[in-house]
Image (tube, coloured by chain):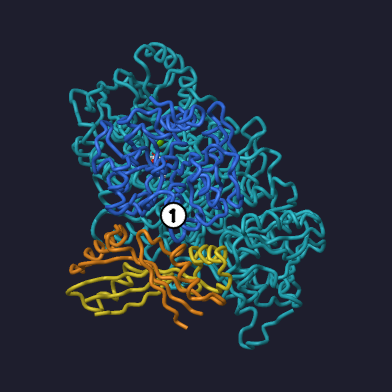
Chain colours: A blue, B cyan, C orange, D yellow
């Protein structure tokens, strides 16, 4: 799988993502500077975490005007898999590739810790190798990760089965305590209607190595790999 | 040369006095220059000869530190930060730095720019910053008084500021320390530590080498930020200085991230002859220091400096402390490389001058010569003072009969809920400690452990200082700071390789304060010599006084260690029911300066515990040998709150996890014949509790017996969440769930008020 | 041209900072707060741009139409 | 009482968000920006407070007098 990890001024999860990807077999991954204009040669595009343009104004607001984002739009339209992690998720929302928006955590404090997320559906290229209802241990690290969307949008997310991850308890219950940031309906990650663009606040790339306490992030990348190599056909 | 003629009544000597230069210092300037200085030159001398830049009151003391060693690649004082070899061609650069006064004025920005400053110090060395620590002190945060509210605001502002800068730039904050004590009312301490990693051949030098080489200014435009800030940091904090508004600098971590990447890219290109960050005293300090180090001169033109507004005066440009700026000297002919890289990273830059051969710092504004001073006189010929030190009076030893024996059941709750002992997760949860995917042991255990993937090395780091001990006995307190830091490293499986220290003291003109400074330096030196740890650099922050009094002497020690193998990484948390718990070291009995005395009796007195380095070292060596033999599942030292607190903390699992594990422990201390409160809460040094698998107990006991060191088999880890301690005939027991609540919720509760 | 742009969160959108600030005001003894919203104020000096271009910038960049309303005033 | 409070960074104080936003506008083709500052706008509905109390709250809580200036307007 040929992967691009986009690098915006202020990205800081770019190297983490690159290394996580390279820990899989049959993967090549490279950094792509935000001034580049084409992503045609890649099968998978990752928008990493960080503070693009300092996250000034609004998270992701300035990055979405980077030249590379036109190539991202084009890739999204053509069905290429695109993953936005944390700041990458915020950029995808600002760019209109995902609905809704991410605002400041309800208690206004940055939060860095491990959290549990429930996989809502296996019916996506990003979760196809994970049975729905499984609970993953993933680190979060954000100050503006409260997912917000209007009623109609939330309804549509439900109707089209676009919510892929929710903050949950170890038993998979969706509770207020399990929600670290006040996200609507405990939403931690969503995809678009075509199901090829996925944004999430937790950091799967920080959970790919035993040393770091969890390898649950690998399942997301394995799903992506499987999808790219075997196509949409295979599932659980 | 401009003169002061415009205002006849303002003679240079009056102006010098207004800049805090003494009359002897002014005379020295006259003889160095052979003429009267102008306004700009007085400004330049005043900042370069301030305590902050010149260490004029402390340098003679600092010479006492051991600074050499076979692993030292760059020694303390040579450059912005020391560099230590970690093997296989890799090295680490690290340093601690204070931002106390700016944080008192504006906690968020003061702390943020402190982090920014220390990160620049590290990448100036050519190293990629990989983690941060922070050492903090505030006045008490409990209660409804105005003071407590102020302290809470300072505390939350500082933590948010540190988080803001570190999180944005993507350098994880993986550890630190914080204490709350009335001596810090109105004068909080904010010390930030950064460590970076580099290959030996990547070490960059802050020297202006190569006559004719171009000098570039890169990074943020200069504004009026922190004008006179360097001088400001060397004065006492008064009500007036709070109105010193221009001294507030705003940090821009985004700019710094770009500057960091651009500088590392530039350094990798091989075209850099010298590089220096602009910290305190900005342009002035960086130009004369690089010239002095290079044995050269520099000539720059202020018209070419990128500016926020065109009307900045020469004086302002020279003394501004705007953040996120660097001075880079490149080899002739490489101008285009600089241009390409800085344009890629969208950073302002300017070719502002050249390296010269006349040893002078010459500053022009267009055609006018504004400053003409021999560079060495500024950087290396600052006056040095030997201040008067008071003679020390040892405090009276504690008379135990005056200490009512409190119920241990209540005391343990009190101690665990004391903000200085309670869980600090409220703090580090606001710090991104997982970015860069190297944090193997996150904050919450004795020392943090970071994996440097490219070098395949495991680094451990900790910072420590019990200032109560230091206030009672600065020399012993400083020794303990080193011993405790080394012990924390040992508990994580690491061997110390280098130290950096931050000396936070009051006004050095007060003989008591100067004594404290000297005693602390000597204590740290003894400790570092004993452990064979070179001091690679540090920072001195004097004049830490509020309207009330000086702070408790606070010589913070940060140690960096190496862990040989992945399997040797150890944490303080019990791992499994049935594991057997040992105490390595004595049960102890020293109560002077203890947190028990403070939290339960409101007393800060007595003689603090003593440390014997030979014994302490033997304990660490023994623990490490057990760890290397694979016999240790957890290790935790006894520090504030003594044995009982250490046992409780070991029962609480890693709180960064989504599901926090809690254990209990069943402990029998046997017949001791000392008071229960003394047995449980004394703070004698050199003690470690560790756990081992039941099957390995015999082997452990054999090894310990052979070592001749004191040890006790305390009991075992239980699934049931009860901590029970048998002492003589009595048994005390606590629910670890409730203890955990007291400990975990203490700071969040206070901060919600 | 001097321009002032105000950007406010829409009524239906959560405003955590606004809620927290209202609470903090209560702690100060100001109890009667019935609504408090925090937005942004941008003051801009610009030459050579038309008002329409500025509106465009407000929609595209300065505000997020999904959750914010903006108002642009030319001051001089 | 409806109140509007505007809070702006003081002129001498660096405004990193303003700088970054000005850059972004340039990238959008609006080149003539000579100054851009971002502040806060607070809209407040409150009963039973005096104007003086509100000024006090502005100084103590809503603005940071060390680096910001505020302006309070009673709208109705
Ligand atoms: N300001 C802080 N920032 C980050 N971590 C902190 C801070 N203060 C304390 N910690 C972490 O909390 C844990 C306990 O700290 P401390 O009580 O000082 O431990 P010890 O007594 O072993 O030195 C350590 O892991 C330490 O790194
Ligand atoms: Mg410890």
| Observer-nearest of D18 and B744 | D18
Q: Chain of mark 1?
A: A
Q: How many marks?
A: 1
Identify the residue shown where x is 63% and y is 74%: B315
Q: Position of residue B698 (x, y in %)?
A: 38, 11
The N terminus of chain B lies in quadrant: bottom right
Q: Position of residue B658 (x, y in %)?
A: 33, 35
| Observer-nearest of B56 and B69 | B69
Residue B612 visible to the viewer: no
Q: Position of residue B537 (x, y in %)?
A: 59, 47
Question: In the picture shown, does residue B452 fall above or below A49?
Answer: above
Question: In the picture shown, does residue B8 fall above or below B277?
Answer: below
Identify the residue shown where x is 30% and y is 35%: B645
| Observer-nearest of B735 and B552 | B735
Per the image, label 1 sits on a secondary structure element best described as: helix
The C terminus of chain B lies in quadrant: bottom left
Question: In the picture shown, does residue B497 fall above or below B203?
Answer: above
Residue B595 visible to the viewer: yes
The residue at which mark 1 appears reads as A94
Mark 1 sits near ligand 1, with its Cβ under 8 Å away: no
Question: In the picture shown, does residue B120 fall above or below B374?
Answer: above
| Observer-nearest of B596 and D68 | D68
- Split into quadrants, the picture shows ligand 2 in the one at top left
Taking B41 as reference, is B141 left or right? left
Q: Position of residue B648 (x, y in %)?
A: 29, 32
Taking B331 as reference, is B447 left or right? left
> Label 1: few (<14), some or many (≥20) within 10 Å?
many
């Amino acid at each position: 799988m040929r992967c691009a990890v986009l690098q915006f001024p202020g990205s800081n999860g770019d190297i983490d993502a690159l290394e996580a990807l390279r820990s899989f077999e049959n993967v090549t991954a490279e950094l792509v500077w935000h001034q580049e204009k084409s992503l045609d040669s890649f099968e998978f595009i990752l928008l990493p975490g960080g503070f693009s343009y300092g996250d000034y104004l609004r998270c992701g607001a300035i990055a979405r005007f980077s030249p590379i984002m036109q190539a991202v739009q084009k890739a999204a339209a053509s069905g290429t898999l695109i993953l936005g992690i944390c700041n990458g998720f915020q950029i995808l929302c600002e760019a209109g590739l995902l609905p809704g928006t991410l605002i400041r955590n309800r208690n206004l404090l940055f939060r860095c810790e491990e959290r549990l997320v429930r996989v809502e559906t296996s019916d996506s290229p990003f979760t196809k190798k994970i049975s729905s209802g499984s609970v993953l241990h993933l680190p979060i690290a954000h100050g503006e990760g409260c997912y917000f969307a209007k009623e109609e949008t939330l309804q549509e997310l439900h109707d089209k089965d676009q919510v892929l991850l929710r903050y949950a308890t170890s038993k998979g219950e969706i509770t207020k305590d399990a929600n670290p940031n006040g996200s609507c309906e405990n939403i931690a990650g969503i995809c678009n209607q075509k199901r090829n663009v996925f944004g999430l606040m937790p950091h799967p790339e920080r959970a790919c190595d035993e040393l770091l306490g969890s390898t649950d992030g690998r399942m997301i990348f394995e799903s992506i790999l499987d999808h790219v190599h075997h196509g949409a056909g295979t599932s659980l | 040369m401009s003169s002061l003629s415009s205002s006849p009544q303002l003679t240079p000597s009056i102006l010098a006095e207004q800049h805090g230069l003494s009359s002897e210092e002014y005379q020295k300037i006259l003889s160095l220059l052979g003429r009267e200085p102008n306004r700009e030159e007085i400004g330049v001398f005043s900042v370069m000869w301030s305590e902050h830049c010149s260490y004029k009151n402390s340098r003679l003391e600092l010479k006492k530190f051991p600074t050499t060693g076979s692993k030292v690649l760059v020694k303390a004082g040579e450059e912005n930060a020391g560099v230590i070899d970690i093997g296989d061609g890799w090295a680490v650069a690290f340093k601690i730095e204070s931002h106390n006064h700016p944080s008192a004025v504006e906690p968020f920005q003061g702390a943020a720019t402190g982090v920014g400053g220390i990160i620049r110090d590290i990448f100036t060395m050519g190293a990629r910053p990989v983690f941060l620590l922070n050492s903090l002190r505030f006045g008490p945060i409990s209660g409804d008084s105005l003071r407590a509210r102020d302290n809470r605001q300072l505390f939350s502002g500082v933590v948010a500021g540190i988080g803001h800068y570190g999180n944005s730039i993507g350098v994880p904050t993986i550890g630190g320390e914080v204490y709350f004590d009335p001596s810090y009312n109105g004068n909080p301490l904010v010390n930030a530590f950064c460590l970076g990693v580099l290959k030996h051949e990547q070490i960059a030098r802050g020297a202006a080498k190569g006559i004719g080489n171009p000098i570039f200014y890169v990074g943020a435009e200069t504004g009026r930020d922190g004008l006179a800030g360097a001088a400001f940091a060397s004065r006492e904090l008064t009500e007036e200085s709070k109105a010193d508004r221009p001294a507030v600098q705003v940090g821009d971590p985004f700019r710094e991230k770009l500057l960091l990447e651009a500088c590392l890219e530039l350094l990798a290109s091989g075209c850099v002859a010298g590089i220096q960050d602009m910290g305190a005293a900005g342009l002035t300090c960086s130009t004369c220091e690089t010239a002095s180090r290079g044995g050269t001169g520099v000539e720059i033109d202020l018209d070419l400096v990128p500016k926020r507004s065109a009307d900045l005066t020469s004086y302002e440009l020279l003394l501004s402390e705007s953040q996120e700026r660097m001075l880079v000297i490149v080899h002739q002919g490489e101008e285009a490389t600089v241009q390409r890289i800085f344009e890629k990273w969208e950073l302002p830059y300017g070719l502002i001058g050249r390296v010269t051969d006349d040893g002078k710092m010459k500053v022009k504004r267009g055609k006018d010569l504004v400053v003409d001073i021999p560079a060495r006189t500024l950087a290396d010929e600052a006056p040095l003072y030997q201040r008067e030190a008071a003679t020390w009076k040892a405090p009276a030893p504690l008379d135990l009969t005056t200490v009512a024996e409190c119920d241990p059941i209540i005391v343990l709750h009190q101690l665990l809920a004391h903000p200085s002992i309670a869980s600090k997760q409220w703090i580090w949860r606001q710090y991104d400690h997982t970015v860069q995917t190297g944090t193997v042991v996150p904050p919450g255990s004795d020392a943090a452990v970071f994996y440097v993937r490219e070098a395949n090395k495991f680094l451990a780091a900790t910072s420590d200082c019990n200032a109560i001990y230091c206030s009672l006995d600065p020399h012993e307190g400083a020794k303990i700071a080193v011993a405790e830091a080394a012990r924390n490293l040992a508990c994580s499986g690491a061997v110390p390789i280098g130290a950096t220290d931050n000396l936070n003291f009051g006004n050095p003109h007060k003989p008591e304060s100067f004594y404290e400074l000297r005693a602390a330096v000597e204590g740290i030196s003894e400790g570092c010599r004993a452990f064979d740890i070179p001091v690679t650099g540090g920072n001195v922050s004097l004049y830490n006084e509020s309207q009330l009094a000086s702070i408790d002497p606070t010589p913070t020690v940060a140690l960096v260690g190496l862990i040989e193998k992945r399997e040797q990484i150890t944490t303080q948390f019990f791992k499994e029911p049935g594991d057997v718990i040992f105490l390595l070291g004595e049960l102890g009995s020293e109560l002077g300066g203890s947190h028990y005395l403070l939290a339960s009796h409101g007393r800060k007195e007595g003689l603090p515990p003593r440390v014997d380095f030979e014994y302490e070292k033997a304990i660490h060596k023994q623990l490490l040998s057990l760890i290397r033999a694979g016999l240790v599942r957890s290790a935790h030292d006894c520090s504030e709150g003594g044995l009982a607190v250490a046992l409780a903390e070991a029962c609480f699992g890693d709180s960064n996890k989504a599901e926090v594990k809690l254990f209990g422990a069943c402990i029998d201390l046997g017949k001791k014949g000392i008071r229960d409160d003394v047995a449980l809460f004394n703070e004698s040094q050199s003690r470690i509790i560790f756990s081992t698998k039941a099957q390995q107990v015999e082997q452990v006991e054999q090894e310990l017996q052979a070592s001749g060191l004191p040890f006790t088999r305390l009991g075992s880890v239980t699934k049931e969440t009860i901590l029970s301690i048998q002492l003589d005939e009595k048994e005390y027991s606590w629910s670890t769930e409730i203890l955990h609540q007291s400990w975990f919720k203490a700071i969040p509760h206070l901060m919600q008020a | 041209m001097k321009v002032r742009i105000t950007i406010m969160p829409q009524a239906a959108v959560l405003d955590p900072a606004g809620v927290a600030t209202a609470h903090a005001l209560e702690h100060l003894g100001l109890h009667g707060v019935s609504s408090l919203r925090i937005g942004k104020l941008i003051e801009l000096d610009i030459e050579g741009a038309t008002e329409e271009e500025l509106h465009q910038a407000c929609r595209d960049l300065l505000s997020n139409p999904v959750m914010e309303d903006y108002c642009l005033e030319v001051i001089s």
